[in-house]
Image: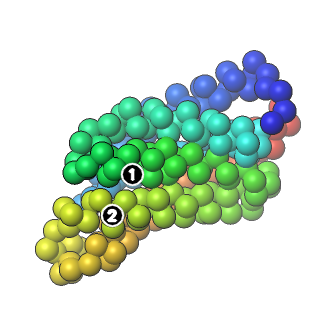
Amino acid sequence: MKKFTSRQLVESAIMVAVATVLSLVKIDLPFGGGVTIASMLPIILISHRYGFKWGLFTAFVYSVLQLVLGVDNVGYATSAFMAAGVVVLDYILAYTVLGLSGAFGQSRKAVAVGIAVTFFLRFVCHFITGVWIWGAWMPEEFMGLPMSSPYIYSLLYNGWYMLAELIVTEIVAMLLYKPLEKYFTGKN
């Protein structure tokens, strides 16, 4: 990683703060989960602006804040091993992967692909804990369907809100790309 600058640190700290505030403004969905107002986009922007290595560091900091805000969820785990799984998969890894978005480049298409890939990776993290840990709380019926498999339950539950979050973030990113192009490309 190249030497960081004060500007890079300040911008990253501001973007982590903006992302954290946006994550608190959530529309709860009827079948669980929620959609924010593109709360992860500031982290994506930093990753494209300064590269994926710096993006991973910034996303890691963001993941720790998300863990602090959602620490109550760890209490649902029935063992220390499961609690560690929630911490690592539902928070640290799930949000840190957002920093990989910058690995796809800085063009508008690269931003769109980076968002899609990193959101898919985040979904995979949540899917695993959905099967492994949250499946124990699987209802008998979900989305009007009988539930007998934690795999189907996790796919539906996590897929539902992650798809909605992906769509919102992609739309906002594409609308903001041109006016913020110099920030996405690091030319300012």
Q: Is residue 119 above or below residue 44?
A: below
Residue ID at (76%, 57%): 104
User: Which sits in the foreground, 63 or 180?
Assistant: 63
Is disc 2 placed on a helix, strand or loop? helix
Q: Residue furthest top?
A: 6
Q: Residue at x 33, y 67 (%)?
A: 131
Q: Position of residue 46 (x, y in %)?
A: 68, 39
In-image side of 100 versus 134 (left or right): right
**Residue at the left extreme, as displayed:** 140
Residue pointed to by mark 1: 85
The residue under the point 62% across, 35% down is 58
Residue 59: image location, x then y, percent:
59, 40
Task: Give the colour scheme of this rendering.
Answer: rainbow
145 left or right of 178? left
- Quarter of the image containing the N terminus? top right
Write down the residue under mark 2: 132
Can you give x and y, in whole percent of width and height, for residue 168 in the image? 50, 56
Asked if marks 2 and 1 touch (Cβ < 8 Å), the reply is: yes
Residue type highlighted by circle 1: Gly
Mark 2 / mark 1, whichever is N-terminal: 1
Q: Residue 186's image quarter?
A: top right
Decide: few, some or many residues near mark 2? Use Cα within 10 Å; few <14, some 14-19, many ≥20.
Answer: some
Report the disc number at residue 45.
Answer: none
> Residue 67 or 165: which is nearer the viewer?
67
- Relative to 123, say whether 23 is above or below: above
